[in-house]
Image: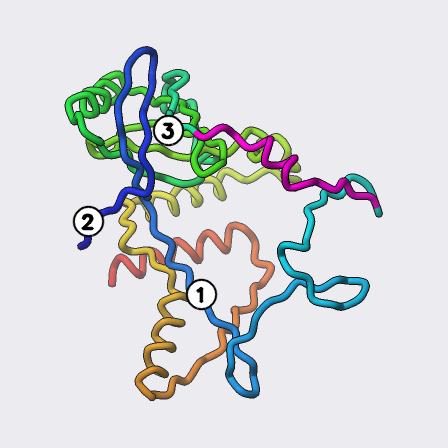
Amino acid sequence: MAAARAMWKGTLKFGKSKVNVKLYSAVKEHTIHFRLLHKTDKQPVKQQMIDSDTGDPVEYKDAQKAFPVQRNRMVVLEKEELEKLEPKDSRDIEVTRFVDPTDIDHRWYERAYYLGPDGDTSAYFALAEALEKKNKEGVARWVMRKKDYVGALRVHEGYLALIVLRYAEEVIDASALTAPEGRPLQKKEIAMGEQLVSALAGKFDPAEYRDEYRDRVMDLINTKARGGKVKVTKFRPKKTSDDAVTNALAASLAGMRKKKSA
């Protein structure tokens, strides 16, 4: 496995203390990116911006940003105006406070990064050990590539990790959901639900979960690249019936017991 490459360098600041760090991505996207070809001659096609009034192509340099504020009304924004609003470049990752890990639930997590030491390892690992012993997470702010970020500084397997957090206006509270309607659940239904949960109890192994669609697409691509042919079977979902909750739970439990006995 190739060594991880740092994508950015910064300085963790908390109080009067500083720790130089390197930022590494903790996740790797595996999205399949297709090239678009003309159906007839199989040549790559290009996307263009088109003037909706004249139909003429528009170069990017001739386009201007605008924001709709009302129907048929937009505020036009100049490039220079937007540049003046960009955050000031900085290498500081400022920790503003330390909180209990339970204060930040999973709804706020967006993207994970590792922070590695850049120079003095003793200060780095001293901070990691202090966070672990105190069972705290730091709330940090920083600017990277002309964008403001807020994140959670935490310890993962002895190393510091920085989790980018969503902003408050991006997270929807559960109280905004419509309350469920219908009859109250019967004791039998609740008991069977608890049995089903117990039957499926186990440890989480991420290796068991893959993007199966991506695997099928890559298998198709590799087979066709070798000159082979693949028979693609169209997925047809099974029809669902309006079984009662009790019958559905009972069927699930029966299936689980049969699977375990086998």
Mark nearer the N terminus (2 vs 3) = 2
- Most foreground residue, 66 or 33: 66
- In the image: residue 193, left or right of residue 40: left
In the picture, the disc for residue 91 is 3
Classify mark 3: helix, strand or loop.
Answer: loop
| Vertical placement of residue 32 versus 229, above or below | above
In front: label 3 or label 1: 3
Residue 179 appears in the picture as rendered: no
Query: Residue at 52% of width from left, 30% of height from top?
Result: 87
Q: Pick out the residue farthest to the right.
A: 72
Mark nearer the N terminus (1 vs 2) = 2
Residue occupied by mark 2: 3
Q: Amino acid at mark 3?
A: Arg
Give the colouring mode of the picture.
rainbow
- Corner quadrant of residue 213: bottom left
Query: Residue at 49% of width from left, 55% of height from top?
Result: 248
Spatial separation of the CA atoms under disc 1 and disc 2: 25 Å
Q: Residue 99's x, y, as percent? A: 38, 18
| Vertical placement of residue 208 versus 203, above or below | below
| Vertical placement of residue 206 versus 146, above or below | below
Residue occupied by mark 1: 33
Q: Residue 94's x, y, as percent? A: 39, 21
